[in-house]
Amino acid sequence: MFSFIARSLIQKVITLFFVAVISFLIIHLAPGDPSQVDPLNPKFTPEMVERFRSQFHLDEPLHVQFALFYKDLFTGKTVSWKDNRPVLDKIWERFLNSLPLFIVGTLLTWTLSFPVGVASAIRRGGLYDRTATFLSYLLISIPGFFFAYVMIIFVVTRFHVPVIGMETFGLNASSWLHAAMDRVWHLLLPSILGATGGIAVLSRYVRSQMLEVEGQDYVRTAKAKGLPEDQVHYRHALRNALLPFVTMFGLVLPGLIGGSVIIESIFSWPGMGRMAYEAILARDYPVILTVNFLSAVLVLVGTFISDLLYLVVDPRIRL
């Protein structure tokens, strides 16, 4: 167990280093010079450009820039080129905004996908299965931005309540409970929209995996022995069908950083995805590189957690 953890950590540190190097090189392969952040600004004189290049080490060779950037990042000195704010502070602020969306959306996706998928597999070919399949393909086919606007129009015209932003503009909450309920209401619609596509896709995976396991010899033997149907489906079949989803669950963590650019933009939600998109448009390289680095860390942490969860799901696996 200890040797596995040690080997895994060493491999992931090496992988993280190569990800950092490659992402840094790709960013600097973009057309144009990084110092030309606002070349159309008449106040951006050549002297200011040189001072900018010197301040952010852009006059150094690439390998020196790489070392200085990550040195500043790990010491908390990296600042945004756009507003000169510390990058980690900006990311932490947006992270706290994206965290509720991520938690609620993930809980809805994973708690609803499995009942829908398992029930479809057990009732294969029945009315429930056909209805769930139709709705799943419908949700997969509808573009997210179109579905979001439809829901916004429906909620606003039907219930006459605001849904844009994290809180109602100009609201003077009489109590903390009133303010909390307003925040929950604004969180509800984008979380549901963020989960619909995941529920549709994941429930299809659950159904196909359950059907594959249900056709195995040991499941037919358990049925032939007269075991209760619930025990066969949920104790024998479902547990073995969970293995692929352990890996998928580990890859959910990067959603903390990536967020949903479309949903956050439509609902004016100041989250991580929207910040990353705005940083790309503004060529704010420190923010882009930091977000990319943190995403890579979360991917590696998620895969490590998945490896450990395999022990819980399948005791035959030994590390």
Image: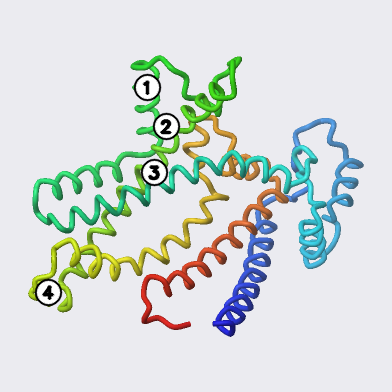
Q: Give the residue at x 68% y 63%.
A: 25
Find residue 231 and report its horizontal and vertical position in percent.
20, 65
Closest to the camera, between mark 4 and mark 1, is 4
Spatial separation of the CA atoms under disc 3 and disc 1: 18 Å
Question: What is the crowding at mark 4: few (fewer than 14 residues within 10 Å), some, or many (at least 20)?
Answer: few
Between 293 and 313, which is closer to the camera in this rendering?
313
Q: Position of residue 254 (x, y in %)?
A: 53, 55
Q: How many marks?
A: 4
**Image coords of residue 303 (percent x, y):** 50, 68
Q: Nearer the viewer, mark 3 or mark 4?
A: 4
Three-letter amino acid code at disc 2? Answer: Leu
Q: Which mark is residue 131?
A: none
Left or right, 4 with reference to 40: left
Quarter of the image with the N terminus is bottom right
Q: Residues within 10 Å of mark 1 (few under 14, many from 20)?
A: some
Residue type for callout 1: Val
Which numbered disc, 4 or 1, marks the residue that appears first in the sequence?
1
Q: What residue is disc 3 on?
A: 195
Residue shown at 54%/30% (left/top)? 268
User: Around disc 3, counting alpha carbons within 10 Å, would you say few (fewer than 14), some (14 to 19), or many (20 or more)?
Assistant: many
Q: Which residue is mark 1?
A: 155
